[in-house]
Every structure is written in C-alpha cells, then in structure tokens.
Image (cartoon, helix red, strand yellow):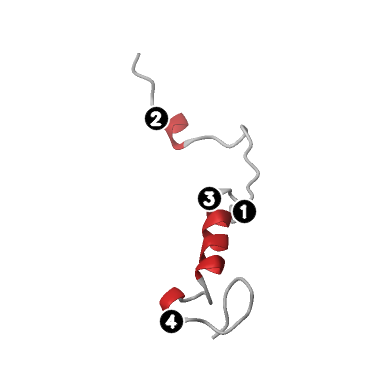
C-alpha cells in the first residue's frame, strides 16, 4: 500500500500515510477546505417548505 499523500510505502503507525508529516498535510487540507466538493447553489430551487401551507 502507498501513502495517500506522497506515494511512499505506508507506515502502520500512520496508516494510510507514511509519516506524521503526511498525516498532518492531509489534516491541513481538510481544515482549509481543499477537499470540499464544489456545488452550484441557486435560489431557483424550491425548498421542501414551499409545499407546506402557511399558518400565520
């Protein structure tokens, strides 16, 4: 198995990474939003609440 960051052999102590450094690189990517899935939000999409009758 290879490290998910650099491709070196995995160290069982840091699996799926080879070192603490690569584990920290991965954590930093999560924290800064690098792994975020891009979306296209529009206001034209009705919410589920739009189908409910209003009671005020």
Residue 56 position (above or below residue 25): above
Q: CB atoms at circles 3 and 4 under 8 Å apart?
A: no
Q: CA distance from mark 3 to mark 2?
A: 38 Å
Q: Nearer the viewer, mark 3 or mark 2?
A: 3
Residue 9 position (above or below residue 51): below
Residue with the mark numbered 3: 31
Q: Residue at x 57, y 82 (%)?
A: 2
How many numbered marks does the figure carry? 4
- Say few, some or many: other residues with alpha carbon within 10 Å of mark 2 (under 14 / 14 to 19 / 20 or more): few
In the picture, the quarter occupied by the N terminus is: bottom right
Mark 3 lies on a secondary structure that is: helix
Residue with the mark numbered 4: 12
Q: Where is residue 42? Give x, y as percent.
A: 64, 36
Q: Residue at x 64, y 74 (%)?
A: 6
Q: CA distance from mark 4 to mark 2?
A: 53 Å
Residue with the mark numbered 2: 52
Mark 2 lies on a secondary structure that is: loop
Residue 17 position (above or below residue 41): below
Among the two numbered marks 3 and 2 on one chain, the one whose residue lies closer to the N terminus: 3
Q: CA distance from mark 1 to mark 3?
A: 8 Å
- Say few, some or many: other residues with alpha carbon within 10 Å of mark 4 (under 14 / 14 to 19 / 20 or more): few
Among the two numbered marks 1 and 2 on one chain, the one whose residue lies closer to the N terminus: 1
- Say few, some or many: other residues with alpha carbon within 10 Å of mark 1 (under 14 / 14 to 19 / 20 or more): few
Q: Where is residue 15? Give x, y as percent.
A: 46, 76
- Say few, some or many: other residues with alpha carbon within 10 Å of mark 3 (under 14 / 14 to 19 / 20 or more): few
Among the two numbered marks 4 and 1 on one chain, the one whose residue lies closer to the N terminus: 4
Q: CB atoms at circles 4 and 1 under 8 Å apart?
A: no
Among the two numbered marks 4 and 2 on one chain, the one whose residue lies closer to the N terminus: 4
Q: CA distance from mark 1 to mark 2?
A: 37 Å
């Amino acid at each position: 198995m290879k490290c998910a960051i650099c491709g070196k052999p995995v160290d069982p102590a840091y699996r799926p990474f080879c070192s603490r450094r690569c584990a920290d690189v991965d954590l930093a990517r999560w924290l800064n939003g690098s792994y975020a899935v891009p979306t296209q939000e529009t206001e034209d999409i009705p919410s589920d609440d739009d189908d409910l009758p209003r009671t005020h």
